[in-house]
Image (spheres, helix red, strand yellow):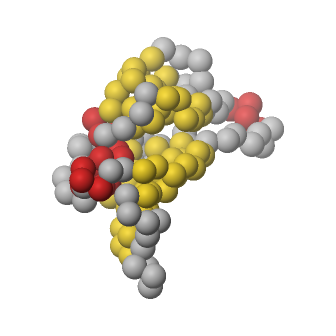
Amino acid sequence: MRSEVKYPRWVNEILKKINVTIYRGRKGRVLKENVPILSLPSRLLSHGGSTIKQRAFIIGFEDEEEIWNQPPDCGDIVVKIYDLKEPGKYRVEIFCSGVNKKVIKFDNKEVLNYQGYEEEDIRNRRQIVGTVIFDVQIREYNL
């Protein structure tokens, strides 16, 4: 269920730089290893602009094909990309959730190692960190 949405070139250029490794649960086998995020089932969750003419796209990705929720909510990995009103400069926010461990790379560098969770984490109300935020510069002639 790959997204049929045609994203602007600047969004595609950023998404092409994101790869993910997904594990079954916290300690399980590798489900997908270092795959492009665009190969995962996805859907556009939101997009638009603001009164200051700032554009943003929020895209959700599903971390595995054998899922409980049908149709998939595509909320296991959420990527928010918005322009910073400077030529070629964008902010990227990546959020992870769900039981599966995920390692996110941007431009072949690890930027987020989300550990997933287990039943004990729920019972203990454990805080699990799953967010990374960074700015990127994309050359204007590539857009």
Tell how many labels.
Answer: 0
Does 89 sit left or right of 117 as displayed?
A: left
Q: Quadrant of residue 98?
A: top right
Does 123 sit left or right of 78 as displayed?
A: right
- Which percent across, then down, holds residue 33? 39, 20
Query: Is 2 rendered above or below residue 31?
Result: below
- Which percent across, then down, holds residue 60? 40, 51
Q: Residue at x 19, y 53 (%)?
A: 4
Q: Residue at x 43, y 58 (%)?
A: 89
Q: Quadrant of residue 34?
A: top left
- Which percent across, then down, holds residue 71? 32, 49
Asked whether 101 or 17 is in front, the reply is 17
Q: Residue at x 20, y 57 (%)?
A: 6
- Which percent across, then down, holds residue 130? 61, 42
Asked whether 36 or 127 is in front, the reply is 36
Query: Is 143 rendered above or below residue 116?
Result: below
